[in-house]
Image (cartoon, rainbow, N blue to C red):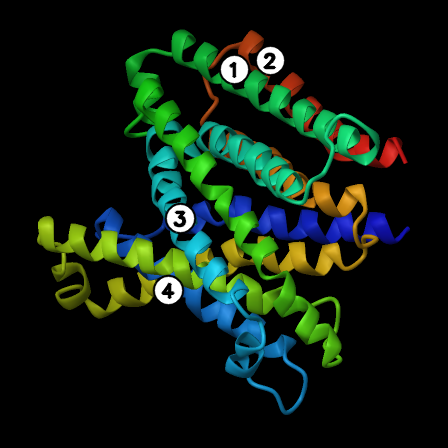
Amino acid sequence: MNTLIGLMIIAIGSFGQASSYVPIKKVKKWSWESFWLTQGIFAWLFFPIIGALIALPAGHSLFEIWSAGGSGVWKSISYGMLWGVGGLTFGLSMRFLGVALGQSLALGTCSAFGTIIPALLKGENLFRGDGLILLIGVSIAIAGIAVIGYSGSLKSKNMTDEEKKKAVKDFALKKGILIALLAGVMSACFNLGLEAGAEIKAVLIGLGAKDLLVLNPVILLVTIGGFITNACYCLFQNYKNQSFKDYTQSSKSIWINNLLFCALAGLLWYSQFFGLGVGQSFFEPGSVMMAFSWSILMSLNVLFSNFWGIMLKEWKGAGQTTIIVLVCGLALLVFSIIFPQLMR
């Protein structure tokens, strides 16, 4: 029962993340770098700070907790900076492939690397016991992603250039796939950053913090690192493209509109990791479900992003065979989520 509750909470957060790119479509008259930086302030600083503060036991500060966390603090920030590269390319994958296919490829790669690497670093034997279940579950998820990727190639073949541009304005399959794969590999560093903050979680638990929220201060460290990378790139692009005028010359109505939708996008994006931390508290520590939780989150993100892809008509005109292949890929993802539980 606890496992089911944990999965439901992670699923709610995942749906929020998959929905976070919908508000961005409502941003008006701003360049990519301007709205990406603005939503990032909310997604990677504002809401993570709030999440971290509500996790603190009474009478304690974030700096006190981080000081007791040892080297894990800087490791989490460093992994966050690497993840930031993935965040940048992740946004570009949406631009060239659309919400559905872009998130599917990027998050699928992120799922595999973000689950397997921490297990290897812990010395887990992936060919016996729980390690084997973990490996098989990730392999099923990767297979689902591969099938979804294949549906994307079918979509490209079956649609005219006009239909592609109508569904995704800057559609470019080959460029988009390469960027999405890079985004996935680098985005896996987020989970490595969370794993590096294990000592911080232990400090919080020792001070009486609620298990539901102890991941939040670690999430903030990783997102701080990611914000540094993204802010440097976006500000450089503002300078290069002379788009600082987006901040200084926009009308009041444009500012209000864009700020509100960027804030909503940031809140929805952050909900995935808030939900991950809360959901994990319902899993048995050290269990295969705990180890597989990152892959579960990424698989659900892919599932829900394709739901939005269908709602936004990104697959319109792709053909019946393509949709059948897409559904098969999604079914594999669903099975990968319940597989560890079936093997218990």
Dot 1 and dot 2 residues touching (CB under 8 Å): yes
Q: Is residue 320 above or below residue 211?
A: above
Mark 3 vs mark 2: in front: 3
Residue 194 falls in image quadrant: bottom right
Dot 2 falls on a residue whose secondary structure is helix
Tell me the number on the disc at residue 41: 4
Q: Is residue 137 above or below residue 148?
A: below
Mark 1 vs mark 4: in front: 4
Among numbered discs 1 and 2, the one appearing first in the sequence:
1
**Image x and y of residue 210, in percent:** 74, 73
In the image, what residue type sits under mark 4?
Ile
Work out how far the residue at label 4 is from the one at label 3, CA to CA, in angstroms: 18 Å
In the image, what residue type sits under mark 1?
Ser
Relative to 22, 242 lies left or right = left
Dot 4 falls on a residue whose secondary structure is helix
Q: Quick check: can you spot residue 300?
A: no
Q: Residues within 10 Å of mark 2 (few under 14, many from 20)?
A: some
Work out how far the residue at label 3 is from the one at label 1, CA to CA, in angstroms: 30 Å
Q: Is residue 232 above or below residue 126?
A: below
Tell me the number on the disc at residue 82: 3
Q: Is residue 52 above or below residue 322?
A: below
Among numbered discs 4 and 2, the one appearing first in the sequence:
4
Work out how far the residue at label 1 is from the one at label 2, CA to CA, in angstroms: 6 Å
Image point (37%, 33%), residue name: 93
In-front residue for pair 152/257: 152
**Image x and y of residue 128, in percent:** 81, 28
Mark 4 vs mark 2: in front: 4
Relative to 231, 336 lies left or right = right
**Residue for badge 2:** 325
Dot 1 falls on a residue whose secondary structure is helix
Tell me the number on the disc at residue 151: 1
